[in-house]
Amino acid sequence: MNVTEALATRMSCRAFLPTPVPEATVRAILDAARQAPSGGNLQPWRVHALTGAPLAELVATVRARMPSHPRGEEPEYDIYPRELWEPYRSRRFKCGEDLYATLGVKREDKLARLLQFARNYQFFGAPVGLFFCLDRRLGPPQWSDVGMYMQSVMLLAREHGLDTCAQEAWSVWHSTVAEYLDLPPEMMLFAGMALGYRDESAPINRLRTERAPLDEVASLRGF
């Protein structure tokens, strides 16, 4: 599989098979992703991979805390700006509507939507959960470096026949995750990621979000 194919077939998988992913495969993906670029070669990313009993224990811990913290913990950062503007607002709205349409969930069915969103905190059934962290003293440029490492992981996963779902949603459970992973105070949880084999039979995995045309996002001069 070449890079173009990996990009074209990567999707946010939200239903996984329980098939285990070998440690050697996870290690190979995380190792190869180290070639991701970073400003000044800081390599600010830190990644934690969980499977089996450790993953199940963390998922159970979060589930037990949800009734008393339905919105999670106090977030360390805003995943989206508080008041989105166009065209971003419409893009986000359509993504959500298209996603719930694959499940036949109507907009007014708030409970069903909430239950589906809560599956983030089960890694959508994936056998491997990844957490990406960085030193909280670093700035936005290093955040983008972590994003490039995550993108590398997602493309390498496709090379191995695996799928992923990047999940900034995990950032609202940063205290619980930090406690479980025994992170030092200076380390900040940036995002989670589900990793595993796609459940081809799940309707939600038929969603393919749209992309704006090239001329809307790029300007080429002097060619």
Image (cartoon, helix red, strand yellow):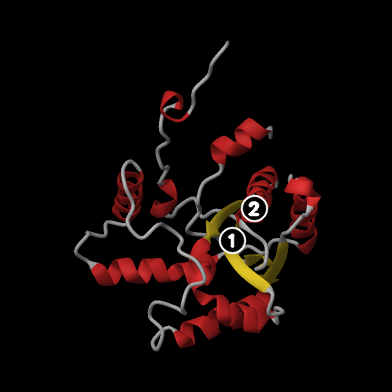
Q: Nearer the viewer, residue 118 or 202?
A: 118
Left or right relative to 68: residue 153: right
Judge whether 151 appears above or below 188 on screen.
Answer: above
Seen in the picture, residue 160 relative to 187 is either above or below; the reply is above
Residue on which the image places disc 2: 150
Where in the figure is residue 49, as x and y percent of width and height? 70, 67
Q: Residue at x 63, y 62 (%)?
A: 19
Q: Residues within 10 Å of mark 2 (few under 14, many from 20)?
A: many
Q: Determine whether the residue tagged by mark 2 lies in a helix, strand or loop.
A: helix
Q: Secondary structure at mark 1?
A: strand
Along the line of sight, the residue nearer the viewer: 62 or 9: 62
Q: Is residue 38 left or right of residue 198?
A: right
- Please state if 101 lies on the left or on the right of 6 as rendered: left
Residue at image coords 67%, 55%: 142
Q: Residue 83: which quarter of the image?
A: bottom left
The residue type indicated by label 2 comes to: Met
Task: Report x, y in % for residue 33.
Answer: 75, 49
Q: Residue at x 46, y 87 (%)?
A: 65
Are the residues at dot 1 and dot 2 in contact (C-beta closer than 8 Å)? yes
Q: Residue at x 57, y 81 (%)?
A: 175
Q: Where the C terminus falls, by quadrant?
A: top right
Query: Mark 1 to mark 2: distance in Å?
Result: 9 Å
Residue to which mark 1 is pinned: 193
Amino acid type of the residue that numbered disc 1 sits on in the rendered structure: Met
- Of badges 1 and 2, nearer the viewer stands 2
